[in-house]
Amino acid sequence: MTRIRRGYIARRRRTKMRLFSSTFRGAHSRLTRTMTQQKTRALGSAHRDRGRKKRDFRRLWITRINAVIRETKVFYSYSRFINNLHKKQLLLNRKILAQIAISNRNCISIISNEIIHFEGKGLNEVPRRMNSGKVEYKLIG
């Protein structure tokens, strides 16, 4: 019986896997079976940690905002501050608020003072800043 030469498909598949795992250490970059296992594990970890990264950054932003809010002593908690932001329909996400809190702490106190200033107004009124810097109120509905 004559010898049958194998095709190139399996070799091409292993080469692709070798390129993926070339930076791994030890047998994880040399042996085919451990390469496949480590590739599966790496892709699973990457998928899991994409969601975890979003959670971790949100926690970091909340911590930074809370620290600055408690330091200014205008609002005594993060939750009240965010609740009042939503009541006044000031659309600032936590990432932007955290950047403001780090770079310019006075700006956070200005925002919180604006919220307190609007506290006496009705909830169905939305503040709008004019070009001159004055605030006017526009009734909704």
Image (cartoon, grey):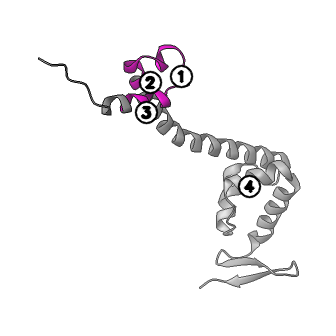
For the residues labelled 2 and 1, say whether their Cβ atoms are less than 8 Å apart: yes
In the image: residue 126, left or right of residue 41: right
The disc labelled 4 sits on which kind of residue? Leu
Is residue 15 a member of the stretch shown in magenta?
A: yes
Mark 2 or mark 1, which has the lower sequence index? 1
* Residue at the disc numbered 3: 16
What whole-number distance in Å separates the C-alpha atoms at marks 4 and 1? 39 Å
Secondary structure state at the residue bearing disc 2: helix
The image position of residue 5, as x and y in percent, is 24, 24
Is residue 114 a member of the stretch shown in magenta?
A: no
Q: Nearer the viewer, residue 133 or 34?
A: 34
* Residue at the disc numbered 2: 38
Image quarter of the N terminus: top left
* Residue at the disc numbered 4: 97
Classified by dominant secondary structure, the portion drawn in magenta counts as helix
Residue range highlighted in magenta: 13-36
Query: Residue 43: which quarter of the image?
Result: top left
What whole-number distance in Å separates the C-alpha atoms at marks 4 and 3? 44 Å
The disc labelled 3 sits on which kind of residue? Lys
For the residues labelled 4 and 1, say whether their Cβ atoms are less than 8 Å apart: no
Discs 2/1, front: 1
What whole-number distance in Å separates the C-alpha atoms at marks 1 and 3? 14 Å
Q: Is residue 64 above or below residue 21?
A: below
Q: Is residue 88 above or below residue 106?
A: below
For the residues labelled 1 and 3, say whether their Cβ atoms are less than 8 Å apart: no
